Image (cartoon, rainbow, N blue to C red):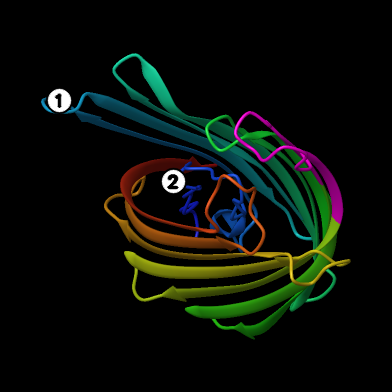
Amino acid sequence: MNKVLLLFSLLFSTSIFAQTIVNAEQLNSSNDSLTFSLQMTYEGTRGNAVTDEFDLAPSVSLVKKKNNFKLFGGYSVLSEESNTLLNSGFAHIRHNYKISNRLKTFEFYQIQFNEVLLLTKRELFGGGLRYAIVAEDSVSFDLGIGFMQENEFLNNETLMEGEITDTHFIRGATLSSFQWIINETVQINNVFYYQPNMIDLSDYRILNDFMLTTQVSDEIYFIASFTARYDSKPPSSLTGFDSKFNVGVGYTFSK
């Protein structure tokens, strides 16, 4: 199971909301490796409604004794007949440096967009420290804390007159990550993110991402996931809460 990338986005199903927090935890590995992964899903309906949805999530992960590099992204498009309902994407690069068996750093840069939910561009860059509270072969639980710069640009077509469309904040970057390898084929992951505005703590974002992965063969795995997100201060034309259930199949190989 260690070589399975567990790639789900937004991702991970790659459904990306304006208040989305991208989950980077699906790309963890404890062994030295160079791993590539590609997840693709398609859903179509015909009859009373004609819709097509396509999600793409590629990734590469390089793990060494002290350093861990991850580069991954996602793209999602949903259309109804000739109308585009969802068009969104992101790219994320991340580095970890191992200080000790339980303590490591994290540094990252991310860029994303979502036309339907008004997000023209969001850039994030930051870093912090992560500590492994539980580090067993089959169970792990980590806590991380850090800070990031957020630069966000919104499309003002449906916003209130005078509403701010360009914001630049320093946010906290706090996470907890739980992993349970039940047996050789089944694994559970749960990740929780909390990102408060450090100037106004009533402005915060939360993500909880639960995923079940089942290994079908050495290269193919099945994914079922549930994601819930909350933004305490969303743009005026958006709601603060989103949730999504996803199932899919992934392919990965290592060398």
Q: Residue furthest bottom?
A: 133
Q: Image quadrant of residue 157?
A: top right
Q: Of the residues tagged 2 and 1, which is closer to the observer?
A: 1
Asked if residue 137 shows in the view, the reply is no
Disc with the residue nearer the chain's start (2 vs 1): 2
Q: Is residue 44 above or below residue 22?
A: above
Instruction: Give the Cα separation between the discs numbered 2 and 1.
Output: 22 Å
Q: Label 2 belongs to which residue?
A: 13
The picture places residue 58, in percent across and down from the top left corner, at: 53, 35
Q: Is residue 157 magenta?
A: yes
Question: Viewer-proximal residue, 164 or 131?
Answer: 164
Which quarter of the rendering shows the N terminus? bottom left
Q: Is residue 43 above or below residue 25?
A: above
- Please report the bounds of the magenta region as a residue range: 151-169
Question: Viewer-proximal residue, 167 or 122?
Answer: 167
For badge 1, the amino acid type reads: Arg
Q: Label 1 belongs to which residue?
A: 46
The picture places residue 191, in percent across and down from the top left corner, at: 55, 68
Which quarter of the rendering shows the C terminus? top right
**Residue occupying image coordinates x 57% and y 29%:** 115
